[in-house]
Amino acid sequence: MVARWREGSFDAFAESLASVGNCAHPIRLTGSSETYDLASGDLVGTYASANAPLGVLFRPCGNRRAEVCPACSRTYARDTFAMINAGLVGGKTIPATVADNPLLFATFTAPGFGLVHSHHKNGTRCRPRNRDRGSRCEHGRPVSCMARHNEDGSIVGAPFCPECHDTDSAIVWQWHAPELWRRLTIELRRALARALGVTESRLKKHAAVQFAKVAEYQARGLVHFHALIRLDGPDGPGSPAPLDGHALAGLVEHAAVATKLEAPPIDNNDVARLLRWGKQLDIRVVRDGHRTDDPDSPLVPEQVAGYLAKYATKDANSIRSADTQRPHLAAMSARCHHLAMRAMKHYALKNGAKKADAKESDPINPYDLLGKWAHMLGFRGHFSTKSRRYSISLGRLRRARARYAELRAAAEHNEQARATLLDLGELEAWLLADEETTLVIGNWTFDGIGWPTPGDEALALAAAARAREYDQWKAQTKNTTR
């Protein structure tokens, strides 16, 4: 900060920092662009990076992970909340009648692959001794634990016995978890069609299942899927549904049990596996087909939206900390690399190719990129996904934010625009419109990633932290009086 003040560039830096929303690792671009009106073809504006405060155009990195960029992850979380909440109560092009449709909050877990140490919120012991079982496994390790572990303890999630724990199967399950979810949605639509007495091809004329889901890492290193599942009528979001929430919950439970996937073996020394969801299936009815405005209800739609948005910015580092590294996660990551090498060697030898050329010679290797996702413990799917017609897309929300920024910047230099009465309904319709009214033609060159100095990055992180604290303070005090 002192260096910026001395050279007289602090105001320019502050303006650049504000333009990227306190991003810690912005993308630097040099060049220029021209904006044309699509209707008339007239040139309506020009921009050049040389006219920027620091002579370079800074753009937010857009990373969703809080560990990488706190500011951009907050923006991603807000967009995810807006997207999920619109599918719950309406708004942002979604009709308000969507709040009358049945809605479930379901959690799909991973199976158990061996005994692991656990933290229990009620304060009970990890795994009390059971006289009906042997006190030790075949490798001589105890199969009981009388301790009460802290939630952030390094031993939480660790196997009782690494040899007894089927880590390979756990990694294979995690690798195929996105496909397992896809098959679950197919099974659910099939079950819904049978319940309505129609063929699967004609289901869309009677009902539609929409969802939004996020993945959450557990301490043992495997993901759980938390999903909002909504039942709509044939006319899209907000149209009357043919079943109530409890009937939909029964169909989801049936689909979860029926979903299965046969995973191919890693190599000749491995076996094929039949993958399923874990037995711990939690399905809760948020709405049974009518609005829930009771503040004492166990689940509030907006609360669920905030819960899902929070986990949309997490990754495998969310179950690690500076003080709690959890060695079993590092061992699981190393095992991912080991299995990837085994798979590459197997498919290279199978095709008669050299081991060094295994990747190029065998594009059908199902575990080809397992090593690339070792840092995610084998999970290669998106953390936040939704069905197409659940609600508005994140792309439209980002485009609306960019349009609003342009409108606000133009209004700051136009007194007549500031004095004009603003119709919020028309403004929202314009911001969220699909069609573009302008065409931007640019010539940009990549100049690098990040701020020029480490001090600038430290200031960006500090500003992001203060902005987060201010947002939390506003949320805590908005409904209170002085």
Image (spheres, rainbow, N blue to C red):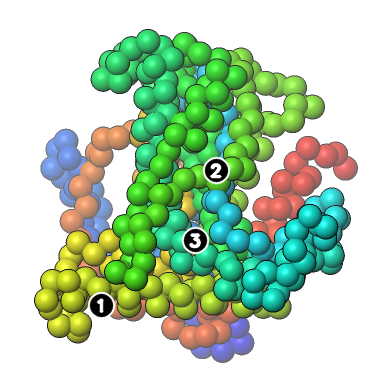
Query: Residue tagged by mark 1?
Result: 345
Q: Position of residue 427 (x, y in %)?
A: 43, 32
Q: Nearer the viewer, residue 6 or 323?
A: 323
Q: Secondary structure at mark 2?
A: strand
Q: Which quadrant of the rendered structure holds the C terminus?
A: top right
Say which residue label 3 marks: 170
What residue type is disc 3 on? Ala
Say which label, 2 or 3, has the lower sequence index. 2
Instruction: Report if the CB atoms under discs 2 and 3 are less than 8 Å apart.
Output: no
Q: Which residue is mark 2?
A: 108
Horizontally, residue 119 falls left or right of residue 357, namely right
Residue drawn at x 62%, y 22% is 287
C-alpha span from label 1 to label 2: 34 Å
Residue 481 rendering spot, x and y as whole percentages:
85, 39
The answer to which of 324 and 65 lies nearer the viewer is 324
| Mark 3: few/some/many CA within 10 Å (<14, 14-19, 20+) | many
Helix or strand or loop: what does disc 3 sit on? helix
